[in-house]
Image (cartoon, rainbow, N blue to C red):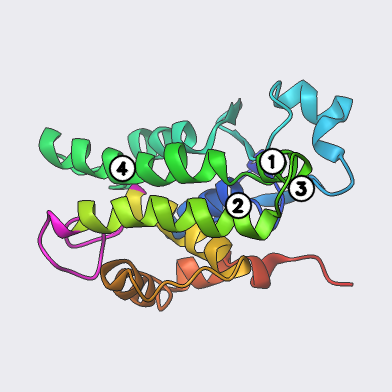
Amino acid sequence: MMAGMVLHDYWRSSAAYRLRIALNLLGLEYDRHMVDLLSGDHRGAENLARNPQGLVPTLEIDGLTLTQSLAILEYLDETRQAGFLPADPPGRARVRALAYAVAMEIHPVCNLRVAKHAAGLGGTMEGWMQHFIPLGLEGLERMLAQGPAGPFCHGAGVTMADICLMPQLYNAGRWGVDLAPFPRITAIAAHLATLPAFAAAHPDRVKPTP
C-alpha cells in the first residue's frame, strides 16, 4: 500500500464518492478514515485540523493534505497523468463546465446541511431535493446534447465530468427523483455503472457494516 495515502470520507458524501472513483480509476491503494457526518465528527477538532471548512473529503497524499474534491481531482490529473481533463483547451473547458454544473450548481444547493436548513424554514427535504436536482439535471442534459453522443460525458473515456455525475445521480435516487426526462444522462450513467472503478466506489459497497 502506498504509504501515507489516506482518504478521510463519509460513505454517502457525494464529494468523497468522486475521489473514491478517481483513486480506483488510477489503481491507487489508500486507507479510508470515516468522518461520520451524522454524529458530527466533521465539526470536531481532529477534522477541523486537517479540513478547516469542517467538510469531507480530505486526501493525504505526497506529504500533502488536500481538500475540495475538484481541486484534488485536478491534482491527481496533473501528477498522475489521469486524463480526467482532455489535452485540448476547448475540451478542458467543456469538461470543466459539465463538472461544475454538477459540483457547483446542483450539489451545493442540495447539500444535506442546506436542505435541512431549508426544511426548517418550511416545506420538506424531499420537496427541496425534488425541485432543485431535476432543475440542475435539465440544464446538464441540454449541455450534453451540444456534444457528440457517446458512452461518456465527453470524448472516448472517463473525465472529471463523469466522476461528478455518478455521485449526483446516486443522490437523486435517494430522494426519488425521476430520471426518465434525462435520457442522455441515464444512458451515460448506465455505462459508467459497468466500470469496476465506479462500481467499487458506490456507497453501498463502502458503507459501514452494522
Which dot, 3 or 4, sits closer to the camera? Answer: 3
Q: Nearer the viewer, residue 15 or 77?
A: 15
Mark 4, secondary structure of its residue:
loop
- In the drawing, what numbered circle is on residue 118? 1
Q: Is residue 28 visible?
A: no
Which amino acid does the dot numbered 2 rest on? Trp
20 is within the stretch colored magenta: no
Q: Is residue 173 visible?
A: yes
The number of callouts visible is 4
Looking at the picture, does residue 133 appear above or below residue 80? below
The part of the chain drawn in magenta is 145-160
- The x and y percentages for residue 85 are 26, 42
Q: CA distance from mark 2 to mark 1?
A: 8 Å
Q: Are marks 3 and 4 in contact (CB under 8 Å)?
A: no
Which dot, 3 or 2, sits closer to the camera? Answer: 2
Looking at the picture, does residue 188 appear above or below residue 60? below
Q: Which residue is mark 3?
A: 33
Q: Which residue is mark 2?
A: 128
Q: CA distance from mark 1 to mark 4?
A: 41 Å
Which dot, 3 or 1, sits closer to the camera? Answer: 1
* Residue at the far front in the pictured view: 122
Q: Residues within 10 Å of mark 1 (few under 14, many from 20)?
A: some
Q: Residue at x 20, y 44 (%)?
A: 86
Which amino acid does the dot numbered 1 rest on? Ala
Q: Main secondary structure of the magenta part?
A: loop
Placement of the C terminus among the 4 image quadrants: bottom right
Q: Is residue 181 left or right of residue 12?
A: left
- The x and y percentages for residue 38 are 84, 49
